Image (spheres, helix red, strand yellow):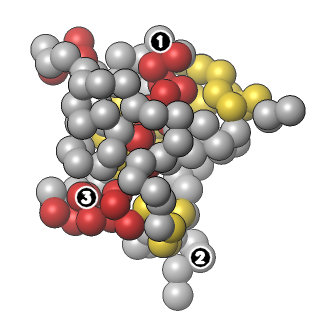
């Protein structure tokens, strides 16, 4: 049985998620119109969020590379590359309604591309 948890979403309240579920999918299912243009494959940064609490120390190499390329490393995370965990509190930084853009194709259930895990800069487990 999958563990149910609550994610606090700034401006939207609490949403229910499954432990290990992709954050981008949990946000959408919870009624948050988070923007995602590349289909959840870390090819863009439209699904970015900021964390108030519960930011995971783990980061995919694809997320690290894209955030570095766009100058967003340490400022935002990609919700398509994050698995839901207890204690998360996030702010979606782009929504379809605030941007006027249409989301891209629906992200897959599993993180794409196949995740190669690393530790985010500044994580409590780094070094």
Question: What distance separates the C-alpha of mark 3 from that of mark 1?
Answer: 26 Å
Q: Is residue 71 left or right of residue 21?
A: left
Observer able to see residue 105: yes
Observer able to see residue 94: no
> Pointers 1 and 2 in contact (CB under 8 A)?
no
Q: Residue at x 60, y 30 (%)?
A: 7
**Please, is residue 62 above or below residue 32 in the view?**
below
Query: Which residue lies under the disc numbered 2?
Result: 125
Q: Residues within 10 Å of mark 2 (few under 14, many from 20)?
A: few
Q: Residues within 10 Å of mark 1 (few under 14, many from 20)?
A: few
- Percent from the top left, x then y, of residue 102? 19, 16
Query: Which residue lies under the disc numbered 3?
Result: 67
Question: Which one is in front, 88 or 31?
Answer: 31
Q: Earlier in the sequence, mark 2 or mark 3?
A: 3
| Residue 31 numbered mark, or none | 1
Question: What distance separates the C-alpha of mark 2 from that of mark 3?
Answer: 20 Å
Question: Which one is in front, 89 or 20?
Answer: 20
Q: Residue at x 40, y 72 (%)?
A: 121
Q: Residue at x 24, y 36 (%)?
A: 38
**Please, is residue 57 above or below residue 122 in the view?**
above
**Please, is residue 122 above or below residue 50 in the view?**
below
Foreground: disc 1 or disc 2: 1
The image quarter in which residue 85 lies: top right
Q: Secondary structure at mark 3?
A: helix
Q: Quadrant of the N terminus?
A: top right
Q: Secondary structure at mark 1?
A: loop
- Percent from the top left, x then y, of residue 117? 50, 67
């Amino acid at each position: 049985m999958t563990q149910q948890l609550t994610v606090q979403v700034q401006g939207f309240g609490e949403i229910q998620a499954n432990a290990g579920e992709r954050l981008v999918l949990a946000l959408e299912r919870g009624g948050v119109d988070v923007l995602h243009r590349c289909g959840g494959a870390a090819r863009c940064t439209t699904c970015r969020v900021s964390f108030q609490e519960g930011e995971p120390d783990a980061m995919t190499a694809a997320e690290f590379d894209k955030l570095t390329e766009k100058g967003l490393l340490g400022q935002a995370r990609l919700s398509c590359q994050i698995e839901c965990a207890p204690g998360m509190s996030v702010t979606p930084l782009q929504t379809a309604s605030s941007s006027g853009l249409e989301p891209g194709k629906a992200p897959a259930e599993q993180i794409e591309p196949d995740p190669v895990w690393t530790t985010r800069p500044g994580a409590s487990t780094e070094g």
